[in-house]
Image (tube, rainbow, N blue to C red):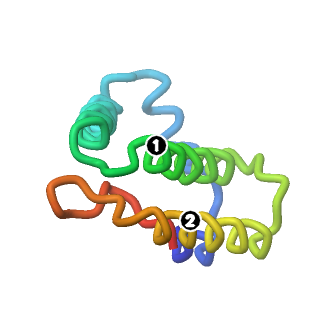
Amino acid sequence: MRNLLCVKGSAPSGFLAAIAEEPGLLDPVRAHNEQLAREIRAESETPDLTFQAFLVVEGIRSMRLFDLCPFSDGELLEQLDRMSDRLADAGPATCNGTEAGFQAG
C-alpha cells in the first residue's frame, strides 16, 4: 500500500464509465474479494485485525480512486505504519502460509 501512495494519478474515467454500463466487469474482483474473505475467516490467526486491515486498505484505495481522501500522503503513511506494527505484534496475517492478499506496509 505504501507504494500505491507514491503513485499519483487521476480516476480512470473510461473504466468507471465501462463498469457503469457493464457491472459484470467487476465479477473477477468480487470473486477475488469473496475468496479472500473466506480465507481470512478460515485461516487467519487474527481474523478481526486482518479484516480491519483489509477494510482500511480498501477504504484508502477507494477514497484515492475518487479523489475524496482528506488526508495527506504523510498522514496515510503514518497510519499504515502504525497498522503494520499492530499486525506484526499480533502475528502473521496469513492464509495458508501466504499473505492475505494485501500488504499493510
65 or 18, nearer to the observer: 65
Identify the residue at horizontal 73%, vertical 50% (top origin): 67
Identify the residue at horizontal 52%, vertical 76% (top origin): 3
Measured as percent of width and height from the top left, residue 32 is found at 26, 40
Identify the residue at horizontal 28%, vertical 29% (top origin): 27
**Of tags 1 and 2, which is closer to the observer?**
2
Measured as percent of width and height from the top left, residue 94 is found at 28, 59
Q: Is residue 71 above or below residue 12?
A: below
Give SS at disc 2.
helix
31 or 45, nearer to the observer: 45
Measured as percent of width and height from the top left, residue 54 is found at 47, 48
Measured as percent of width and height from the top left, residue 62 is found at 60, 45
Question: Is 75 displayed left or right of 13 in the figure?
Answer: right
In which quadrant of the rendered view does residue 77 lie?
bottom right
38 or 68, nearer to the observer: 38
Give SS at disc 1.
helix
In which quadrant of the rendered view does residue 23 lie?
top left
Identify the residue at horizontal 61%, vertical 45% (top origin): 59
User: Which amino acid does the dot numbered 1 rest on?
Assistant: Phe
Q: In the image, which disc is placed on residue 94?
A: none
Task: Residue under label 2, please give it.
Answer: 86
41 or 9, nearer to the observer: 41
User: Which amino acid does the dot numbered 2 rest on?
Assistant: Arg
Task: Residue under label 1, please give it.
Answer: 51
